[in-house]
Amino acid sequence: MSEFLQQLVNGVTWGSVYALIALGYTMVYGILRLINFAHGDVYMLGAFFAYFASRALGAATDPNPGKALLVLVISMLAAGAVGIVIERFAYKPVRKSSRLSALITAIGVSLLLENGGILVFGSDPKFFPQIITARNIPLGLGVTISNQQIIILVVSLALMFALRFIVLQTRVGKAMRAVSYNPTAAALMGISVDRIVTFTFMLGSMLAAAAGVLVALQNPKIEPLMGIMPGLKAFVAAVLGGIGNIPGAVLGGLVMGIAEVMVVGYVSPTYRDAIAFVLLIVILLVRPAGILGKATAEKV
Amino acid sequence: MKHVLGIVVSLGVLVALDIVLPRLLNPYLFQVLVLCGINVILAVSLNLVNGFTGQFSIGHAGFMAIGAYGSAMFSLEIGQRWVTTLGALGVPPVIAQGAALLVALLAGGALAAVAGYLVGLPSLRLRGDYLAIVTLGFGEIIRVVILNVDAIGAARGLPGIPGWVNFFWVGFWVLIVIVVSRRLAASTHGRALFAIRDDEVAAEALGVDTTSYKVLAFVMGAFFAGVAGGLFAHYLSYLNPNSFTFLKSIEVIAMVVLGGMGSISGAVMAAVLLTLAPELLRPVKDYRMVIYSLMLIVLMITRPGGLMGSREIGWPRFLRRAKAEHA
Amino acid sequence: MTSRLLSRLAALAALGFALAGCGGSGSKNEIVIGEYGSLTGNDATFGQSTKNGVELAYQELVANKQGKIGGLPVRIVSEDDQGKAEEAATVVQKLLNQDRVVTVIGEVASSRSLAAAPACQAAQVPMISPSSTNPKVTLVGDYIFRMCFIDPFQGTVMAKFAAQNLKLKKVAILKDVKSDYSVGLTQFFTESFTALGGSVITEQAFSAGDQDFRAQLTAIKAKHPDAIYIPGYYTEVGLIARQARELGLTCPLLGGDGWESDQLIQIGGDALNGAYYSNHFAVDNPDPRLQEFLGRYKAKYGNEPDAIGGLAYDAANVLFQALQKLSETDPETFAGFSSAKAGTDARKAAEKKLRDLIATTTGYPGVTGTITLDENRNAAKPAMVIAIKGGKKVYDSTINP
């Protein structure tokens, strides 16, 4: 029983990471109908920005929560900037082209970030410094949780609530929702679609970067290709929950994280990567709109 | 009559090249040539699915993997024994190995085709982006399953596959895939595929059985990808699941996109170019992938049609006829 | 119509090959030696140590003999296989066919050695692996050698240490399914440990490159082992150790020579305290040959070598010595090693003689111990058990074959 609970804790932790990344995917897809393949790589960049920030600030030699928070903020802002640049130079020109062209462009950007990362950072894994001293907290029943896992859960929740607040309670959020319903009508209402798209990309990238930093805290090995799998899995999570649906992304992320950890723990660790795709195929065959999604009719 | 002559001449040229080339080129360059051929088969076969039918599949590496492992296991278990028996009967090794290789390739291709059918049938209900991700998913699932089957080497790879591939067989299959594609493009079936690509709903409304045709394209594409995989296995003599990740699928997509989706000659040229380029760029091989990715992006922004658009090299007659019909 | 396409293809190809040049290195009069390893990738220190060890030996050749053996200058070509088996096969092909090397030194990881060895055997060019320990490597053929012990021995070493020195009864194993080394070592350890009266209570798996092992460790924790045997490579071992401690596993961790890297403790940190692993040498071994080598290595590279650097150094020197011997006893055949003679029968004859000479290496005074190759071209050497205490590697004991 305690093994199951421990696996559950691990699963929920991973699930919140996937949820953070999935949020970015779902927001961009909701507005642009584009699968931003490069999103997983922004997650990777977030981890690397944080790595360099930590070293610059000396956060490892003198770990304290203030510096760690600063590292997180720096990384998020830098990644947000990257998101804006990507959108402006790669995605905007293909917005009017076919979706296939946009998808290939996204793949191109993803490859560029990965291989650019290899070029700039080197392909050897780097080890993220311990900017928060690790402590294990036994929860009873033989389950332990590390303070890093707690931080992941808390920060993820905080960011998700922040996003929800932005989307539901602010004007920008209203504009975002309007653009995702119908860009033409939104434009007619005086909303600058371009600006909203840019803002959405920025938000999504910031969340992905945060996910990257949180993961690096717990799993200190970072390398330029670390974003591929989590990116794909997070996309599957977004589809699982209903693409375009923000609570759906969170739900999908949690389901994905728990399913994965359970399969690794109880079935076989070498099937880890396949689970995401099996889930994807099942959901697309059974309920293509996702758990919380609404089926939309295709207009001819 | 014309056809038979064409076939005999082509086969003759292949045999001649097969004898001459290994003497002219050192094994490293020969390897590059063989890899060119394999990539051409992959690109042209993917072109059937992506280019002709407009179905965005990014799981091609998975079919290649099935063909590779399938044909390898066939050769290791059955084919090798045939060769030794035939050898004992006095059949020259070139013929015996060639025959065994042919059967192994067909077996691998057939296995891949079955996989193509199984993947195609459920997925082809989906459109565009979703289809792309599902095919990606299937490709990954295939790779992960291979990683877990100890009997075929699992994560450590499968060594010791008989190296029966020579230039003749690579050239042979390159010719076959090109001829089949061209024949298909010129036929009514090809017409149906193009219709599906251009406007699926309209095609369906006009009575084209879109599902069957999409599955057909998938199965054919998978078959040839499987053959390419078999050639790969029997050339390298060693298989590792890492050769079949979705990065490989993306490489093949890059070839089809660069050549121009729907253009066979474009796919051929792009495949050759993209196989030679990394070898030529070995001194700056660190930049190879960065250049690849930049190329994809720039291409999509400036010239989504690729090198050839959907045109082909050298059939003015064919083109004129196609244009007349389109207009 | 097909002939037109064929002719266009041929034209394109011809252009390509013309650009690529006729291939092959020039016909200079020199001896080219190839070395391959994982300079980048997950276990990058393996490749770097190999390269450094070989280079140090070469530097000394330059200092003592102007870098020449038998009058011919020696040149080392290094290739990076990025830690991938397919890439190892490709770069060795390049070394054999483009650079026309006389011998290949490499690799550290058994999987990569296994991928490349068939090419060397087929080309009848000797390959000397500094530290691949899986027995299958030298079984590929008689041109494949290694400078180290093999895993049936290494598995027994740790099994003995666990059963007799640490008096452990129940061990869990966490193996890397991607590596022949790990899978083989698991098997040998299990056989020996059960023969000594212990039991392997569970076997979990991971893949090299994985970052999260909590699921497997949680399953292991549920079985309450006395120790966990982790026959993997240092990057994953470091992460596993950390996560094990985080999950509350306090038992000792055991391992093999795949742990050997100066990055191990950097990655694993304090989590590795109380761990033991079997290795090819111990830095605090007072053997004067070893200490002197450590000094020279440190002077050149700034940090202490690991066992792989030492083994690569020995491999290079064994090779140089064999070449030297051939040049003295049979200068005519030796002349076949010149790169001008690549691909000729003279080269083939020279390679055969070289192979025979390397195979008879007996009592060679290496820095990693005395090297004598047996009939399977493996070295029979004692293993050192290294303990990790207070964040440092400390020599614990020697176990002889």
Image: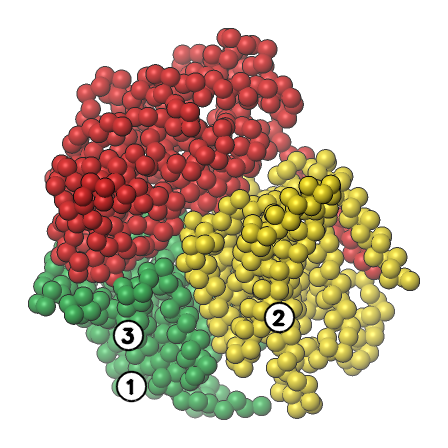
Chain colours: A green, B yellow, C red
Q: Answer whether residue B221 is visible to the viewer in this image.
A: yes
Which of the image's four quarters has the C terminus of chain B? bottom right
Chain bearing mark 1: A
SS at badge 2: helix
Spatial CA distance of label 2 from label 3 is 36 Å
What kind of residue is marked 3? Leu
The location of residue C147, given as percent across then percent down, is: 37, 27
Question: Which residue is pictured at 85% across the width and 52% down the height?
Answer: B9
Q: Answer whether residue A93 is visible to the viewer in this image.
A: no
Chain bearing mark 3: A
* Residue at mark 1 shares a chain with residue at mark 3: yes
- The residue closer to the viewer here, C37 or B229, is B229
Mark 2 vs mark 3, foreground winner is 2
What kind of residue is marked 2? Val
SS at badge 1: helix
Question: Which residue is pictured at 44% across the width and 80% down the height?
Answer: A284
In the visual, does B259 lie left or right of A183?
A: right
Bin the neighbour count of mark 3 within 10 Å (Cα to Cα): few under 14, some 14-19, many 20 and up. many
Disc 1 designates what residue? Answer: A168
What kind of residue is marked 1? Leu
Upstream in sequence: badge 1 or badge 3: 1
Residue reaching furthest to the right: B1
Bin the neighbour count of mark 2 within 10 Å (Cα to Cα): few under 14, some 14-19, many 20 and up. many
Disc 3 designates what residue? Answer: A254
Q: Which mark is residue B219?
A: 2
- The reply to whether the C-beta atoms of the residues labelled 1 and 2 are less than 8 Å apart is no
Question: In which quadrant of the rendered view does residue B254 lie?
Answer: bottom right
The location of residue B285, given as percent across then percent down, is: 52, 45
- The reply to whether the C-beta atoms of the residues labelled 1 and 3 are less than 8 Å apart is no
Mark 1 vs mark 2, foreground winner is 2
Judge whether C1 appears above or below B21 on screen.
below
Which of the image's four quarters has the N terminus of chain B? bottom right
